[in-house]
């Protein structure tokens, strides 16, 4: 997918709303044993990359070092017409950071009231001497908004073949 196409998907109105409204996603990756994994993660979108912070002892780090290709899914909406999703594919780049990954705190400040975020930061700083910063630069992205008909192509084709009842 070309960068222009990725940028268009990520800048669609609903995609921008998803990125601004939530800091929760699902990360899919291949474990060291070759089997798939999907785990809930917090993330922060910098405008160029999705940043996930974790403990330096997290099992996913060893897996990502061997298999850096990942997928990230961000969803919202609890009705068929309100369902929206952003699917991203990319490559994970891991850096060990002394102290706390700045984007980890930025995500907390985005999703918590100021007082709660300050308490969270105090606790996190006491807990982590280091963190792993996982940066995912999108190589593919697709935004779906089921209520507006922005759906996967295979579903569009199926819908075209449906004859409405008389």
Image (cartoon, rainbow, N blue to C red):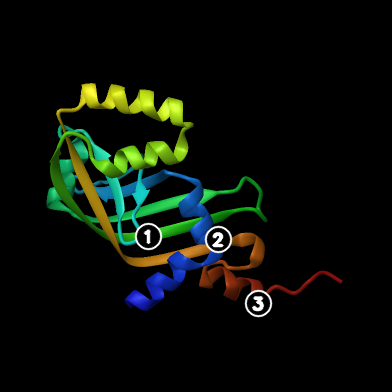
> x and y percent of residue 122 in the render?
30, 23
Q: Is residue 8 left or right of residue 45?
A: right
Q: Is residue 70 left or right of residue 151?
A: left
Residue identifier under label 2: 14
Task: State the CA–CA distance, disc 1 to disc 3.
Answer: 27 Å
Residue identifier under label 3: 160
> x and y percent of residue 64 in the render?
18, 48
- Pick out the residue farthest to the right: 166
* Mark closer to the chain start, 1 or 2: 2
> x and y percent of residue 100 in the render?
22, 35
Is the residue 111 above or below the residue 126 in the image?
below
The answer to which quarter of the image holds residue 55 is top left
Q: Residues within 10 Å of mark 3 (few under 14, many from 20)?
A: few
Between circles 1 and 2, the one closer to the viewer is 2
Residue identifier under label 1: 88
User: Which residue corresponds to the image point at 65% horizontal and 71% vertical from the top-left?
Assistant: 159
* Mark closer to the chain start, 1 or 3: 1
Task: State the CA–CA distance, disc 1 to disc 2.
Answer: 15 Å
Is the residue 6 above or below the residue 124 in the image?
below
Between 50 and 153, which is closer to the camera in this rendering? 50
Between circles 1 and 3, the one closer to the viewer is 1
User: Which residue corresponds to the image point at 53% horizontal and 63% vertical from the top-left?
Assistant: 144
């Amino acid at each position: 997918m070309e960068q222009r196409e990725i940028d268009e998907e990520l800048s669609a109105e609903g995609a921008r709303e998803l990125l601004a409204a939530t800091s929760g996603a699902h990360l899919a990756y291949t474990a060291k044993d070759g089997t798939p994994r999907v785990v809930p993660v917090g993330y922060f979108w910098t405008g160029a990359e999705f940043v996930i912070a974790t403990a330096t002892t997290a099992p996913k780090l060893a897996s990502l070092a061997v298999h850096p290709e990942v997928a990230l899914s961000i969803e919202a909406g609890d009705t068929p017409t309100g369902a929206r999703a952003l699917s991203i594919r990319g490559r994970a780049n891991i850096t060990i950071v002394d102290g706390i990954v700045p984007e980890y705190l930025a995500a907390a400040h985005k999703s918590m009231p100021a007082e709660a975020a300050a308490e969270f930061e105090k606790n996190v700083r006491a807990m982590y001497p280091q963190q792993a910063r996982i940066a995912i630069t999108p190589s593919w992205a697709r935004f779906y908004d089921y209520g507006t008909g922005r759906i996967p192509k295979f579903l569009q084709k199926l819908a075209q073949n449906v004859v409405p009842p008389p």
